[in-house]
Image (cartoon, grey):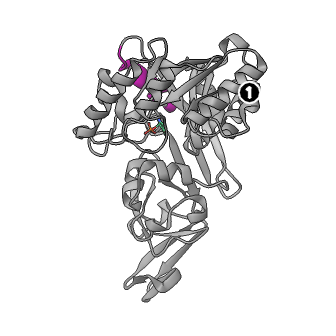
Amino acid sequence: MAGDRTGTALLVDLAAIVANYNLICAGLAAGAKCMAVVKADAYGLGAGPVAQALWRAGCRQFAVATIDEGMSLRAAFEDVPLEATPEIFVLHGLYPGTAEDFAAAWLTPMLNTPAQVGEWARFAESVGRPLGAGVHIDTGMTRLGLSPAEARDLAERPPRGVTVQVVMSHLACADEVGHAKNAEQLVAFRAVRGHFPAARASFANSAGTLLGPDYHFELVRPGIALYGGNPLVSGVNKFRQVAQLKAKIVQLHRVDTPRSVGYGAAHSITGPARIATVPVGYADGYLRSLSRRGIASINGVRVPVVGRVSMDLITLDVSRLAERDCAVGTEVELLGNTVTLDEVAASAGTIPYEILTRLGPRLRRSYIGEAA
Ligand SMILES: *Cc1c(COP(=O)(O)O)cnc(C)c1O
């Protein structure tokens, strides 16, 4: 089995990622394409293998958060011929003093402030060739981006040497389909993108993409949908599960006298029970908030996490399984097709994004699926 010597494995289904990508692409307005968001190491799943699989599926635009992520991602494409190498956009824009690194790795900054625009323009002038850029415009998120007025100034007095290739904005409430802010931001974005007629426009994250063709423009920017999370706060998740966290039972306790389980003696057993110990804990991103609330699956049978999640271990009440179906070495699914990402997130009181991005460095990632 893939994984480490304890049998713990984080399986990443690249075929499922590609299927999710194809599903998104199939629903896009004519002419729109998908810029895959692979920031934070592809939401913890491994930016290199994930981006390469998407590239093989036809994806030619990627977005990362930081320049360091961008440089690592570019290195993952070093064997690709120049004419087929993807565009890599850096959402956080141009950190002061990094222009040279951007250019050397063929990264495109999403410029967020007039100061960043100025620095990129000065750098273009110093190297004596035009440089491409994206421009992020704030239409209501108040996080990153030029104000609409700053964007208009930029369009009216374009700095020499900077070619605006993409104009983007980000939705604040796209996961709530009926939220009034979606339409408000759309109106604001349409107005401001009109100042940059030659640029491709990009507005929608995964949830925004599901709001319909008005939100697609030339490039959509899905992240969580590629990785199998439900982009919407409610409704059916039509995306395939990607991450599977599996581990093997390391010890079993047959209990017949009343006793407690784990730290804080937080769980009490009153009658006969069997408790299975599994070597995954909050150091692996199995969040402590899953204490008493998490569910695991053993051959499709759902069993509860009892007691507190510790750093490296959890305990399951496996009393409902026959002894022969649950022994030391039996495989347990903590995240996957039975206990889905959305369910784990809901049990932990968080969102799928946080579950994925917290999956820890101790977990060995193994890539499965056709594209692997
Ligand atoms: C993270 C991010 C995305 C992707 O969002 P999902 O909700 O995961 O689809 C898109 N655009 C920007 C600017 C982001 O920061």
- Could you tell me which residue is drawn at 68 percent across and 10 percent down? 83
263 or 370, nearer to the observer = 263
Which quarter shows the C terminus?
top right
212 or 162, nearer to the observer = 162
Q: Is residue 133 visible?
A: yes
Q: Is residue 153 magenta?
A: no
- Could you tell me which residue is drawn at 52 percent across and 81 percent down? 263
Task: Point out residue 172 in the picture as x, y percentages from the top left corner.
Answer: 36, 42
Magenta span main SS? helix
Q: Which residue is mark 1?
A: 105
Rendered position, 54 above or below 313:
above
Give the structural element (helix, strand or loop) at label 1: loop
Q: Is residue 26 magenta?
A: yes
Task: Point out residue 301 in the picture as x, y percentages from the top left corner.
Answer: 39, 56
Range covered by the magenta-colored residues: 17-29
Residue 295, picture quadrant? bottom left
